[in-house]
Amino acid sequence: MNSRFPAHAVFAGALLLLASGASAHAPTDIAGGFSSGFLHPLMGWDHVAAMVAVGLWGAFLGRPAIWVLPVVFPMVMALGGALGVAGIHLPGVEIGIAGSALVLGLMVLLAARPPLAIAAVMVGIFAIFHGHAHGTELPHSASPLAYSVGFVLSTGLLHLAGIAFGMLTSLRLGKPLVRAGGAVIACAGALFLARAL
């Protein structure tokens, strides 16, 4: 490898594969609203991988998907969070979260270009699982509104990270690098899914 970037990408991918998939879903003693909500998505690599993949896929698809997908995800995630807060059971949450990283990573790897409506529905379905996990783990001492604002903002920043990486598609070697990023996310998702089953 002549460039230093692919070596960094391989290293980051290896770290992603070694990360624990369930750490974001364990009981937490972080108290308080906004900061707890903001940190919650960052505490589990399964969440991070899927949320970065949303931005990455949106950037790969181009306009208007580059902003539609990252807007759909947190909006529907908030609905899933409300279901979790209300105590409404949703089966297969961990499988849905792990599956989201696998499927969204594959979409980038395979350069899948479905119609925007189908891509948005896929992202929205996965967002329900992520939101439900956040909602059921809402700390009892936290302000639900502040917590929700925190996790939606954190999610948006992860989407922006994916978009920033996805913007490499404008470079000569950018598309293969972005697709390689999708491969890393898909591999991580497969590992998360194996642990969730």
Image (cartoon, grey):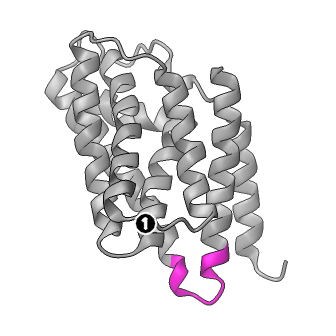
Q: Quadrant of the C terminus?
A: top right
- Whether residue 169 appears in magenta in the rendering, the answer is yes
Q: Is residue 17 magenta?
A: no
What amino acid is at disc 1?
A: Ile
Predominant SS along the magenta part: helix
In the figure, is residue 21 to the left or right of 160?
Answer: right
In the figure, is residue 185 to the left or right of 53? Answer: right
Residue drawn at x 34%, y 48% as measured from the top left = 121
Residue 44 seen from this side: no
Q: Secondary structure at mark 1?
A: helix
The structure residue drawn at horizontal position 39% and vertical position 23%, both measured from the top left corner, is 133
Quickly name the residue at label 1.
163
Q: Quadrant of residue 31?
A: top left
Give the class, few, some or many, for how many residues have Cα within 10 Å of label 1's Cα (few <14, many ≥20): many
Residue span colored magenta = 168-176
Determine whether, in the image, residue 103 is placed left or right of residue 124. Answer: right
Most extreme residue toward the bottom, as rendered? 172
Q: Residue at x 26, y 40 (%)?
A: 76
Rendering coords of residue 130 (x, y %): 40, 32
Measured from the top left, where is residue 106 in percent x and y?
61, 54
Residue located at (57% from left, 62% from top): 108
Quadrant placement of the N terminus: bottom right
- Relative to 1, residue 188 above or below: above
The percent position of residue 73, horizontal first and vertical second, equals 32, 47
